[in-house]
Structures are given as structure tokens and as C-alpha cells.
Image (spheres, rainbow, N blue to C red):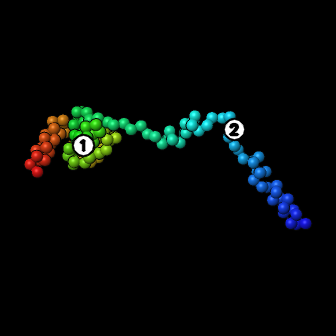
Amino acid sequence: MVNVLRIKLFKYYTPLNMDKFLRRKDSSSRTDAEEPSRSVTKKLKKVVKRNYDEDYIKYGFSWCGDETAPRPQCIICGDQLSNESMVPSKLKQHLYSSHPSCANKDKQYFKRCLEQNKKQKKFM
């Protein structure tokens, strides 16, 4: 009697009878090809290539690397930052945090430092 009861329960809970508990997509709804996936659009980031502006010299930065995607280079310490950090706020942050003694210098000071660095590279 117990075995018969087990068989009846097994037949009732087979995958065929469990379909009523599953949520399935309607065949009449959009297919994946028609509807863009949300997860793919979230992962794609818009890459912005920032260009060097001559006013960045007042923050103590010149540029190096490729002209299409220049990288800011600190005139004082020679650190190269990423292209994404070629924004005045991030350049100021580097200047004030790494070189607080040079934070109040004018444009001409940084131009002289840049010329000295170029001359040093020429002789090396």
C-alpha cells in the first residue's frame, strides 16, 4: 500500500505536472533579437577622449603620448595620469595634494619648468 502511494505521488509531481508553476514567455511576445538586452546596454560605457587645453599649464600639466588621446603629465614630478583625468578639477587635485608649495605659482613658472625639462631630455 505504501509503494502504491509513493508511485501516485511520484506521478503527480513529475515535471509534466510542474509546468503550471513555471513562468514561461508567451510565444507571441517579442523575441530576444527584437528587444535589446538591458544588461548589455548597462555594461557599455561611452569612452570620451579628452584633448589637452593650453590653460592646463596653470595647473602644472603638459601632455605626452598620442595626439588623438593625450595623457596629462605633471611638469614637477613627471607623473602621467590617464586620459580620463584630463579635467581641471583632477589636475588641481593633483597639484594641491602632491605639490602644495607650487599651488600658488603662476603660468610663467610652469612654462619655465617645462622648458627646463625639455632641455634636460635633449641632453640625455
Label 1 belongs to which residue?
65
Placement of the N terminus among the 4 image quadrants:
bottom right
Left or right for 22, reference 85:
right
Residue at 29% in and 35% down = 51
Determine whether 80 is above or below 58 in the image.
below
The spot of residue 84 in percent (x, y) is 34, 41
Residue 1 or 120: which is nearer the viewer? 1
Residue 41 or 97: which is nearer the viewer? 41
Residue 4 or 51: which is nearer the viewer? 4
Amino acid residing under circle 1: Gly
The spot of residue 122 in percent (x, y) is 10, 46
Amino acid residing under circle 2: Asp
Secondary-structure class at tag 2: loop
Residue at 82% in and 57% down = 11
Label 2 belongs to which residue?
26
The spot of residue 17 in percent (x, y) is 79, 51
Q: Residue furthest bottom?
A: 2
Residue at 75% in and 48% down = 19
The spot of residue 114 in percent (x, y) is 16, 41
Is residue 61 something that shows in the picture?
A: no
Residue at 14% in and 45% down = 117
Secondary-structure class at tag 1: loop
Place residue 35 in its image quadrant: top right
- Name which of mark 2 and mark 1 comes first in the sequence: 2
Determine whether 19 is above or below 49 in the image.
below
Disc 2 packing (10 Å; few <14; some 14–19; many ≥20): few
Count the numbered circles shown. 2
Mark 2 to mark 1 CA distance (whole Å) = 54 Å
